[in-house]
Image (cartoon, helix red, strand yellow):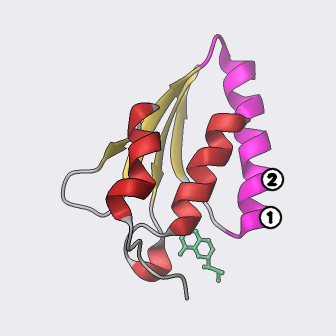
């Protein structure tokens, strides 16, 4: 069972700088990624999906044309854990 973040502010700071935001009323983070077209957006989702499966940690996300709105939280912990930080960092690097 993953543990909730203890170093919350420190762990979130680099992601906030990259455009992630805390979700109101829920222990989760969100970011909308914008791409140049649908194929770029869906290609990125495909790469993220393979990593999500490898990490056994899955995003909540919605794709509309060339934008992907992502919310990350750990359902098993009912809040943010290190897994959300790792998946967010992976999303930034792909
Ligand atoms: C059984 C399996 O390990 C769990 O259900 C995993 C799968 N992916 C998951 N993804 C997310 N975001 N939160 C979880 O708690 C979670 N749990």
Q: Secondary structure at mark 2?
A: helix
| Relative to 14, 42 lies left or right | right
Where is residue 68? Give x, y as percent: 54, 32
> Quadrant of the rendered structure where residue 52 is?
bottom right
Location of residue 90 with respect to 83 vertically, above or below: above
Number of on-image labels:
2
The magenta-colored residue range is 35-56
Location of residue 64 with respect to 12 vertically, above or below: above
Quick one: which residue is furthest to the top in this view?
Answer: 36
Give the spatial CA distance, label 2 vs label 1: 6 Å
Give me the residue at 33% from left, 56% from top: 9
Location of the N terminus (image quadrant)? bottom right
What is the chief secondary structure element of the magenta stretch? helix
- Magenta span includes 76: no
Location of the C terminus (image quadrant)? top right
- Magenta span includes 54: yes
Where is residue 32? Give x, y as percent: 45, 31
Q: Which residue is mark 2?
A: 50
Asked whether the beta carbons under mark 2 and mark 1 sit within 8 Å of each other, the answer is yes
Image quarter for ligand 1 equals bottom right
Mark seen at residue 54:
1
Give me the residue at 41% from left, 71% from top: 5
């Amino acid at each position: 069972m993953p543990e909730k973040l203890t170093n919350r502010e420190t762990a979130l700071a680099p992601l906030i700088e990259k455009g992630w935001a805390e979700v109101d009323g829920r222990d989760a983070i969100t970011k909308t990624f914008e791409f140049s077209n649908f194929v770029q957006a869906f290609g990125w989702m495909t790469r993220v999906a393979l990593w999500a499966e490898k990490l056994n940690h899955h995003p909540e996300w919605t794709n509309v044309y060339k934008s992907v709105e992502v919310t990350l939280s750990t359902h098993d912990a009912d809040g943010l854990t290190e897994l959300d930080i790792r998946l967010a960092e992976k999303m930034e690097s792909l």
